[in-house]
Amino acid sequence: MTDAAATDERPPVREGTPVVLVDEVHAGYLPGVNILNGATLTAWDGELIGIIGPNGAGKSTLLKAIFGQVKVRQGDISLNGEKITGLRANKLVAKGVGFVPQNNNVFPSLTIAENLQMGLFQRPKLYTERLDFVTGIFTELGKRLNQRAGSLSGGERQMVAMSRALMMDPAVILLDEPSAGLSPARQDDAFLRVSEINKAGVTTIMVEQNARRCLQICDRGYVLDQGKDAYTGTGRELLNDPKVIGLYLGTLGA
Ligand SMILES: Nc1ncnc2c1ncn2[C@@H]1O[C@H](COP(=O)(O)OP(=O)(O)OP(=O)(O)O)[C@@H](O)[C@H]1O
């Protein structure tokens, strides 16, 4: 467990180039107001990274900064060693960044199949191959490809949104609160699916309000507070750290 602000202890140093490196990023929506204040994050190939923290800490903003949706004013973001800071979404998708926003993440008037095709508009020839991959994880979608996305439940829409991002065979998938708005049973399913996506080899960065559940499945986590990573460590380390428990997770062992 690391108190990033107070000690030099870090998780084991890994060699090579991370899939995603967010380096001291400052970013915000309004002139002169930064939401991210030096946020730093590293995701290595195949890792499942969780980002937790209080409301308004800037968790979603961090994903949006990686995906070019909010102005980065200082610092850099790189993908497999290549600087991607400020690139537009279409360029980022082509380079291998998949983003699943929390809301409005499907085209409701289109069928599931059409939503998935939209995810692959830059490489349509891969459709059959990628469809096999996503329906291997989201088997129920494969049986309902002609159903309109607008008629699906919240959990099912979330699956379509994740599937659409996976169609491009991304190097990394960014998930903004995949469990938000779902019933407890559906939340369990959402976390299971995130694990399955990651176990299929996709580097995954997930923001979650459901901090405890997030840390239970992630390899490493970042606690974001006031736009900066306050703590980082393995999921288990963060779950057991008294300071993280006291400040961000509520009661011990809950
Ligand atoms: N489009 C926007 N324009 C201006 N301010 C914004 C915009 N989006 C978010 N903010 C502000 O940025 C701050 C951080 O928001 P963000 O959604 O990143 O936090 P969060 O950590 O994901 O919070 P939560 O857990 O509540 O979703 C908040 O104060 C929010 O009001």
Image (cartoon, grey):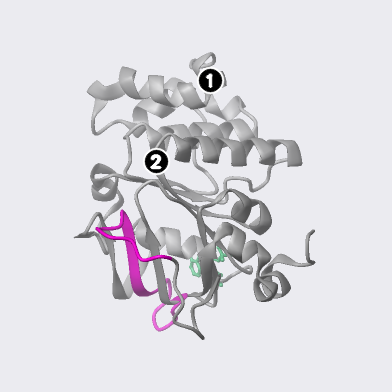
Does residue 28 belong to the magenta stretch? yes
Q: Which mark is residue 202?
A: 2
At 64% from the left and 58% from the top, the residue drawn is 211
Residue 156 to residue 74: above or below: above
SS category of the residue bearing label 2: loop
Q: Which mark is residue 52?
A: none
At 54% from the left and 33% from the top, the residue drawn is 159
Magenta span: predominant SS is loop
Name the one closer to the observer, 209 or 72: 209
In the image, the segment drawn in magenta is: 12-36
Q: How many marks?
A: 2
Mark 1 / mark 2, whichever is N-terminal: 1
Q: On the rendered image, what quadrant is the C terminus found in? A: bottom right
Residue 33 to residue 45: above or below: below
Residue type for callout 1:
Thr
CB of residue at label 2: within 8 Å of ligand 1?
no
Mark 1 or 2, closer to the camera: 2
Quarter of the displayed picture in which ligand 1 can be seen: bottom right
Where does label 1 land, which residue? 139
Asked which quadrant contains residue 73, the reply is bottom left
Q: Position of residue 31 (x, y in %)?
A: 39, 80
At 49% from the left and 83% from the top, the residue drawn is 7
SS category of the residue bearing label 1: helix
Q: On the rendered image, what quadrant is the N terminus found in? A: bottom right
CB of residue at label 1: within 8 Å of ligand 1?
no
Name the one closer to the observer, 241 or 93: 241
Does residue 160 belong to the magenta stretch? no
Other-residue count near label 2 (Cα within 10 Å), few / some / many at <14 / 14–19 / ≥20: many
Residue 175 to residue 223: above or below: above
